[in-house]
Image: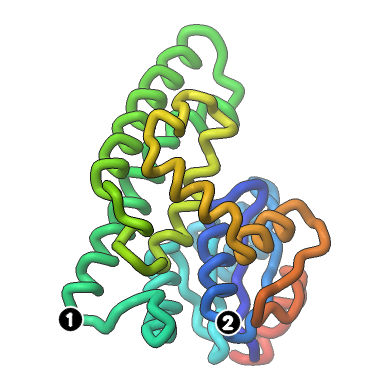
């Protein structure tokens, strides 16, 4: 089996895991999961009972969900490429700290805004959700701006899997228009640098359903039905 990432569209946080796989360069496939229709289906829940993306099915058939767990799984094989660090080192602790902030505070800040958008909130309810969400997003950006400072990447002079996850969440500002990233010049600089990265351009093309040019290990897409058949054969 080839490891397979089940990624959510539109604009899922699984974007960062696609970028991470490209940077890692190992063979992998992708499985497109439409949200909310397919991700909440009984068929997908046989893979991930929580009904969320991403889910990584490893080459040995094991299933890993939650972005932080997937990135740490990939990172263990990307230490030699500078994408992660050996467990027990100061670098590993700093990476985990950054990933924890990104997968909780930074991600969750957009929660009220997504709820208002996806559930058709109107009137006072929408106003309250957007005001709260705007304050949370601004706070998360200000905190991350201070953490980044004048470093080239989130952890210093080399890119890591934290940068891969960051770009997948940072792009959500275009949907909600509650902050101007130019007010956070270090984050804007990082965002622009990542947007120019071939792996990030690849992930954008994959999400849009366009012809995507992989820099390394992409072996094509499979359907959820095919993924389920592979799981049954591997069982």
Location of the C terminus (image quadrant) = bottom right
> Along the polypeptide, which appears first: circle 2 or circle 1?
2
Label 2, label 1: how far apart the Cα atoms are: 25 Å
Give the image location of residue 49, x and y in percent.
51, 63
Relative placement, left or right, of 125 versus 155 is right
Residue 208 visible in the current orientation:
yes
* SS at mark 1 in the image: loop
Give the image location of residue 154, x and y in percent.
34, 57
Alpha-carbon neighbours of circle 2 within 10 Å: few (<14), some, or many (≥20)? some
Dividing the picture into quarters, in which one does residue 187 lie? top left
Relative placement, left or right, of 56 versus 93 is right
- Mark whose residue sits in front, 2 or 1: 2
* SS at mark 2 in the image: loop
Disc marking residue 2: none
Give the image location of residue 79, x and y in percent.
37, 83
Please tell me which residue is depicted at 54% across the width and 62% down the height of the picture.
54
Disc marking residue 25: 2
Relative placement, left or right, of 126 versus 213 is left
Height in image: 168 above or below 115? below
CB atoms at circles 2 and 1 under 8 Å apart? no
Height in image: 167 above or below 73? above
Disc marking residue 88: 1
Please tell me which residue is depicted at 20% across the width and 69% down the height of the picture.
93
């Amino acid at each position: 089996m080839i490891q397979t990432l089940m990624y959510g569209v539109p604009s899922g946080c699984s974007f960062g895991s696609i970028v991470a796989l490209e940077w890692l360069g190992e063979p992998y496939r992708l499985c497109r999961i439409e949200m909310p229709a397919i991700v909440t289906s009984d068929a997908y829940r046989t893979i991930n009972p929580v009904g969320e993306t991403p889910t990584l099915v490893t080459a040995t058939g094991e299933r890993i969900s939650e972005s932080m767990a997937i990135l740490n799984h990939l990172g263990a094989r990307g230490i030699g490429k500078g994408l992660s660090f050996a467990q027990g080192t100061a670098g590993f602790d700093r990476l985990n700290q950054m990933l924890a902030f990104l997968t909780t505070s930074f991600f969750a800040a957009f929660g009220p805004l997504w709820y208002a958008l996806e559930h058709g909130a109107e009137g006072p309810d929408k106003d309250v959700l957007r005001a709260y969400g705007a304050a949370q997003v601004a706070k998360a950006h200000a905190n991350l701006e201070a953490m980044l400072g004048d470093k080239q990447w989130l952890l210093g002079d080399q890119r890591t899997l934290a940068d891969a996850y960051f770009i997948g969440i940072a792009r959500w500002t275009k949907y909600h228009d509650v902050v101007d990233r130019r007010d956070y010049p270090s984050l804007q600089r990082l965002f622009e640098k990542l947007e120019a990265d071939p792996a990030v351009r690849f992930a954008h093309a994959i999400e849009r359903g366009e012809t995507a040019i992989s820099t390394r290990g992409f072996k094509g897409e499979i359907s959820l039905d095919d993924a389920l058949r592979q799981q049954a054969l591997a069982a």
